Image (cartoon, grey):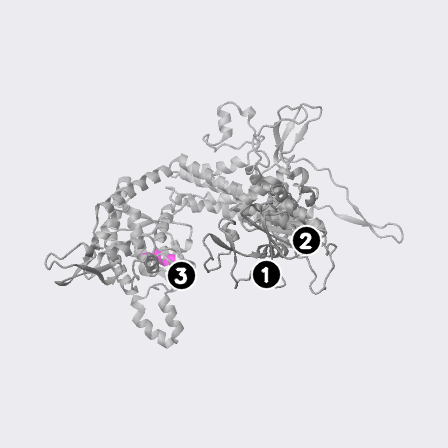
Amino acid sequence: MLSQWIECSDCKGKMKFSKYGLRGLGFKVCVTCGCGDRYIDSCPMIGTGYEINRRLVFVFRLLGIGIHGINLFFGLMELTTGFNIKVYYEILEHIKIAVKSVFAIVQRKAIDEERQKNAENGQGEDLTVSGDGSWAWVHFARRHLMCSYYRACDYRKKITDAIGFAAWYETHKENCSANHEGSAGKMEVSGVVKMFLRSLEKFGVRYGFYIGDGDSKTFKMLLDTHPYGENIIVKKLECVLHVAKRIFKRASDAKKILTQRRKTEAAKNKPKTKRTTGKKGSAPKLVAKKKKVAIKKEKTADLTIKLMKELSRNYSLAVQRNKDSVEGMRNEIWAGYYHKISTDCNPQHTYCPESWCKYKKASANNTLGQFKHPPALATDVQEVLKPIYDDLTKTELLERCLGGNTQNNNECFNSTVWSMAPKHIYNGKKVVKTACLIAASIFNEGFRPVLKMMEVMNIGIGETGVAYVSKHDQERIIRENRRSTNASKESRTKRRQDKLDENALLEQSEGIDESGTEESIAHSNAHGMRPLKYYHVIPERDTPANCPICMEQLRTGTDRERYGWRYVCNNHQQRIRFAPTDNTFLSKARLKGGMTADKIIRIIHKWLRREPLITAQADLSISAETAIAWYGYCRDVACTIAWHDFVPLGGAQDVVEVDESHLFKRKHNVGRLNSWRHIWVLGGISRTTKKVFGIIVERRDADTLLPILQQCIDGDSYICTDCWNAYNDCHMVFNGHGNVNHSENFINPPREEPPIWMPAGRFSNECLDWNWNGNPPAAGLQPFRIHTQHIERAWRDLKSHIKSSSSLDIASQYLGEWMYRINILGDLTTEKGQYERLIKYFNILTSILYDIININDLI
């Protein structure tokens, strides 16, 4: 276009523009006129290379995208053919040099700042460092910048023998990325020791304190190496969060031992039976010993996952609140333990602070008479927890926790590194090292060092880049300040809990004790009640309700056996209690035995996902009879929903395919005869909405089929059938009827012949044959063919889930389930929405779920 409007100032001739010497995104513009050819660079040059290529590779490297991603972007955006791998790595080498020089400045500044902080706090010249290893993908066996695997070495081993590889490796050794020999577990150890050994020579400082994550191998190697001589010993500090995890880990191990001990004691105390001899010739009788009268015991708390998490969190908070005092740490840690074992008869709150201890607050407010302790830890739980607290409150350990140090900064830095060198993609040593240097610079100084790196690489920096960096750093500070507030932390905690409640139906229950204790059953019931409350199947505890007899408002009371609470009415001679599950589908379920609320929720979910019965039986540890009963119950609900919400198929612009089929046939007349072997199923499917219906019919004559079709299909619809005589009068009932002779072909007319041409707008696009490539004989016509392929495919899907059956009732259930999954679930895109629809109908249809539904009565 420009060549038509521009002419040469010298020869006054037309000018032509063409692209020449394309390299990446850079090229030369060739200007041709009467004066000859002249060349103009498309962008500034850096030596013999184009600046745009260096800028592009650097920016994509910040995004964690390598050469293959760049070339993919170029190709699909129709920009250029992409980079040559040699050119790419040459640019990467320039980036590495620039990044390394800028990082040296940033690192020196960080050391000077640390020295200044130590001087201000009177901590001496020795610096405190925190070391942590971070894996890339396990197969790459890399930690820090140490690697025991390199693709070139691996490939060379495969194509040469041992002698040839040894000769090749001598020339390759200096450039090899695999700079570690030994086990993968030693990489972190070797990397930390190397950093300590070079600190004096490279930076002129000593690392006197090392914050570790509990890995004793690393610190032991530091002590054995003596990086600063035998007279100077590196001291270890503990990461508070990793120490707090030890309570959870050791308590989990203790719980396993405790559970086994309880099972053993229960087996010993199980009532035994003895044999007595009856009359002569009769079989021996089993006479059980008389049961002893159970003595009511005080309710106690068990060692649950929730409790172990709470103990771990309390330990961490106790250390961080008293990070300058060993004695303060010890007292508050033990305060958490004694607080949990306190009872009304024996309160033990000597060490408890008033900030979180409700007993101390009640004492300060003179309301101890109204205070009641929650259930204390069981005696056997106290016995296994006390040794753990003894070990984790030793002076040596707490002294290493002074300062409340954590490795959160290490984790944050690691995530920054792997955002530039993604873990799921293989990256060489050069790429990972460059990512580490850039990440360290950004971690220390924000995005300002990035501009300096670009300046060192001779990449131009404009006002837009400077403004973006300034805005990015400012927004990051504002965002982190906001996230560090207590309100933000509480909000994140609430969102996580809400998400857990929403997805409770998809989670596997954790920590459910299979010993059959009351505590484990209560925990399982509470876990299963969560999604039911979320979907408003059962009420929350604070939901008001009235007594159905006296209409007075009910109060709530504690129910220790099943749900944790219940409604109570005291306005009668005998107190009346109402469970929260009354008038719901759980009212007839036995939730005190093995089939808890949690298992009911999970088996409904498994049915929804069409998991086999045997899988549900194994995963939930239930009997085959229970699994079959609940799967049948779910089919009853689905069948009821399907017909309750059924709307006649079709419409003025729709085509409905109709066919009849056997649900079960004996192949070659071999196999068991079914009681309903002569019963047929009539069904149809809409080509537009893909919704279906299916009804069992005793006869296939016109008097039987036509009334059903009139009930299930809109009269304005066009229907397609086979040539069965019962369909001959369909044209009198519906707005058009076409048939196909299956003895000759399955499509009318066949694919190789021209279609039936219908006026435009007669049918929706889903009903037409768009596979026909020919032109219509006249304008305003669209191709159409008569067939029943869609309903035949729907029959196949139905029969794949009915392997065999000998009951008409079960057959009608499967038909209802088939309609429900296509008509109802087909409109819901998410599994959450599908489950919500099903679980709500469970509650609404409680009154009719326990009776077999006669489908023919519903239509």
- Residue 679 is tagged as none
Q: Answer left or right for 14 relative to 70.
A: left
- Residue 140 is tagged as 3
Instruction: Give the residue at x 48% y 36%.
Output: 335
Q: Answer left or right for 521 relative to 463.
A: right
Quadrant (top left, top right, bottom left, bottom right) of the N terminus: bottom left
Residue 122, position in %: x, y? 28, 41
Determine the secondary structure under disc 1.
loop
Q: Answer left or right for 769 relative to 89.
A: right
Nearest the viewer among 113 and 89 is: 89
Hey, what amino acid is under mark 2?
A: Ala
- Residue 635 lies in the magenta-colored region: no
In the figure, 699 relative to 517: above or below?
A: below
Nearest the viewer among 123 and 169 is: 169
The residue at which mark 2 appears reads as 726
The residue at which mark 1 appears reads as 746
Q: Residue furthest right?
A: 280
Hey, what amino acid is under mark 1?
A: Phe
Determine the secondary structure under disc 3.
helix
Question: Can you tell which of label 1 and label 2 is closer to the viewer?
Answer: 2
Residue 645, position in %: x, y? 60, 41
Q: Magenta part mainly helix, strand or loop?
A: helix
In the figure, 761 relative to 42: above or below?
A: above
